[in-house]
Amino acid sequence: MEAPAVPSNAFLAKIDAYRTRIDNALLLELRQRENSVFYRPLSRALKGGKRLRPILLLLSYECTSRITEDPLPAALAVELAHTESLIHDDIIDRDLMRRERAAFHASYGSEIALLSADFILSIILNIIARYKDSRVAQTLSSATSEMCEGELEELKLLRKKKKLGEYQYISIISKKTASLFEASTAIGAIIGGAKESEIETLSKYGRYIGITYQIRDDITDQERTTSANILKLLEKDTDKNAASKELSNSYLFKAKEQLRALAANDAKALLLKFTDFVASNAFTSS
Ligand code: IPE
Ligand code: IPE
Ligand code: MG
Ligand code: MG
């Protein structure tokens, strides 16, 4: 990975404003379940994420928007789907830490963790039902199916400790991670009333930036010996890290190539900068 360009304060302030909008809306959505036994655990589960997927959704919406249906609920839905997947993922990976503190199941136990993730699913369904366009629900449903498939395929490989080729590695991370990035950018475009070609462009962009992000996360995570990481199983006789960095760069390039097809506007310029920021994996906190 080349050293990331230092993001300007103006850029960081803009991204922070998106994050604040998302966090405030998440709080409001949760507050509607204030009397639920899940309220406190869920407030805890939602804390501290970088909100990459909902920000990508909002930026994709703004890049192509012709109509003004509110994209914010959908942005919450993708963040909630991500949250749910992390709760399950830490159980599957037997990871005890997440976002520099105890993982959800380590704090509450597996039973509450599993039920909380189910409860999150019920909130997602409620939110998605607010959209008349059935493509919103269909796109999210496809992504969550793929995520489950990717997680299971990865689990089987990790159990077998079998070496895997680059194609298989990309296929798995594409399913378990990039599918939700793709759904986020596609849904943003759909809600914005984008043309078919723009939806296609932003879908592909989301897939590629998702793959880039997971490869870079795997490279960073490799040192964590307790963590499940299929990158370690990648069959390469040469310098593994260099090869993986090259691989992630090639997907970053593909992601940016997609954006060239979109008309120039402020949102597109911000999305381009955000692409580098996501790929740099150099966030201050998570
Ligand atoms: C973590 O995703 C899981 C991966 C796909 C690598 P994020 O890095 O987006 O997680 P948070 O929500 O910001 O903690
Ligand atoms: C990311 O997988 C989780 C999902 C895509 C559901 P990982 O297991 O590789 O990510 P971390 O390292 O736990 O965040
Ligand atoms: Mg994990
Ligand atoms: Mg995992």
Image (cartoon, grey):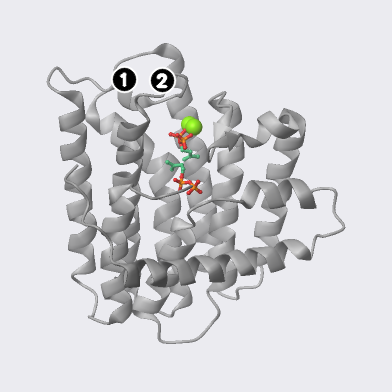
Q: Residue at x 30, y 81 (%)?
A: 266
Q: Could you tell me the amino acid type at mark 2?
A: Leu
Q: Which mark is residue 269?
A: none
Does residue 99 appear left or right of residue 28 in this picture?
left
In the displayed structure, 197 sits above or below 113; it is below
Instruction: Tell me which numbered mark, 2 or 1, is placed earlier along the sequence.
Output: 2
Label 2 belongs to which residue? 157
Q: Position of residue 260 (x, y in %)?
A: 18, 70
Residue 26 position by quadrant: bottom right
Label 1 belongs to which residue? 233
50 and 260: which one is in front? 50
Q: Residue at x 31, y 71 (%)?
A: 270
Visible in this render: residue 19? yes
Q: Position of residue 185 (x, y in %)?
A: 40, 63
Visible in this render: residue 189? no
Evaluate if marks 2 and 1 touch, with contact meaning CB atoms under 8 Å apart.
yes
How many numbered marks are there? 2
Q: Residue furthest front?
A: 9
Q: Residue at x 67, y 51 (%)?
A: 121
Residue 157 position by quadrant: top left
In the displayed structure, 69 sits above or below 131; it is below
Q: Could you tell me the amino acid type at mark 1?
A: Leu
In the displayed structure, 98 sits above or below 93; it is below
Q: Position of residue 1 (x, y in %)?
A: 19, 42
Does residue 108 appear left or right of residue 247 in this picture?
right
Q: Position of residue 269 (x, y in %)?
A: 26, 74
Q: Residue at x 33, y 46 (%)?
A: 213
Depth-wise, is mark 2 or mark 1 nearer the camera? 1
Say which element carries label 1. Answer: helix
262 and 269: which one is in front? 269
